[in-house]
Image (spheres, helix red, strand yellow):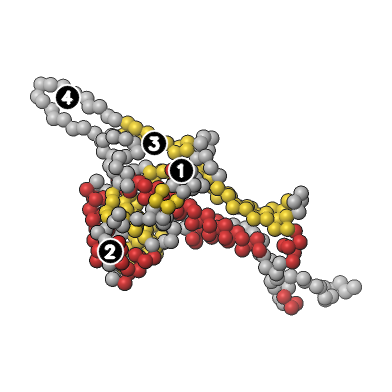
Amino acid sequence: MPVDGSWNLTRPNAKNNGTNPLELVIEEFSGIVEGTIARRSVTESWLPVRSVKGTATVSNYAVGEATLGKVVPGEAPPAQKAQFSKLSLTIDTVIFARNSFPLLDVFQTSFDARKEVANEHGKKIAKFKDQSFFIQAAKAAQLAESPFGATPGHGTGNQVTLTLAADRSDPAKLYKAIADLFKGFEEQDVDPIADDLVIFLQPGEYYTLLQSEQLTNGEYITAEGNSVKTKVLSAFGVPVISTNNIPKGVIADHELGTAFNGDFSDVVLLVFSPRALLSGETIPLESDVFYDKIFKCWFVDSHLSYSVTPNRPEYAGVVLLPA
């Protein structure tokens, strides 16, 4: 055997004896679900989610607005009462996706089916999570009372109802509905730009506004500090995002519980800021691929545990179809 390294090595992962010794290596499952969610979800990095560990419940406290009085000469000004309230969110459900592959099938499949399934997990979880946030945003926008009760200074949701169902396809009437919605926000001291409102609508309404030149190029900054290029509403400077994840029709037996059930057939578009919702997670998204010797199968697993509820409805708005 030569000692100068001139003998011929067989590199099974080199394609046609090429120079790359790892060219034929099959990519192993790693971070596929997380990456897919980052691409597919429109709320993932925009809405902050609290970590909930050591308990099942996360709470927000509210303080009522201050009361003013006038000073009367010669009299000590009386103290005024302040009101407080609390809102709680309980996380009690684990959402999962799981697929299993018989050992022989993994070896006899010409592509990495585990990776493809992991991509599907990511797409499904992204849509599910977006939809759960949109459900609670729609409910917040239609609340006639704050979740904190009659605490002074805490408002109600904002709704605008179109005159006709066909108005959703009329750019001028759709634009006016958004303007009326923003008027309601400002009447409750919510600044559409400073308070980080974002408009979420379905592709049909998005392209209605786009073709009428009501949308211009812009960008917004996510909760993680990332800059995202998007369209903005020309007169208001608020980001506009097209998504298929807005709930449609009747939702019953939702996996996260009855608080997520409802009829969303009349929802045209949603406008809300992160302050509109309270959300928490006990188990962030976790994904794994593993081999089980008992079942002689490969498993692709993804799971997470979180929930969300209305928090400040004055930061949420909805445009509705007529009844």
Q: Which residue is identified by label 3? A: 87
Instruction: Look at the image and tell me in which quarter the N terminus lies.
Output: bottom right
Q: Residue 86 vs residue 90: left or right?
A: left
Q: What residue type is disc 3 on?
A: Leu
Residue at 24 percent across and 66 percent down: it is 172
Ranked by sequence position, the earlier of labels 4 and 3 is 4
* Count of numbered marks: 4
Mark 2 and mark 3 residues within 8 Å of each other at the beta carbon:
no
Helix, strand or loop for disc 1: helix
Q: What residue type is disc 4 on?
A: Pro
Ranked by sequence position, the earlier of labels 3 and 1 is 3
Find residue 234 and report its horizontal and vertical position in percent.
27, 65
Residue at 27 percent across and 54 percent down: it is 160
Helix, strand or loop for disc 3: strand
Q: Which class describes the residues within 10 Å of circle 1: few (<14), some (14-19), or many (20+)?
A: few
Helix, strand or loop for disc 2: helix
Ranked by sequence position, the earlier of labels 2 and 3 is 3
Question: On screen, 85 above or below 142?
Answer: above
Helix, strand or loop for disc 4: loop
Q: Which residue is identified by label 1? A: 258
Question: Nearer the observer, disc 4 or disc 2?
Answer: 2
As drawn, the label of residue 167 is 2
Residue at 42 percent across and 52 percent down: it is 250
Ranked by sequence position, the earlier of labels 4 and 1 is 4
Find residue 251 and report its horizontal and vertical position in percent.
45, 51
Question: On screen, 36 above or below 155?
Answer: below
Distance Cα–Cα, label 4 vs label 2: 55 Å
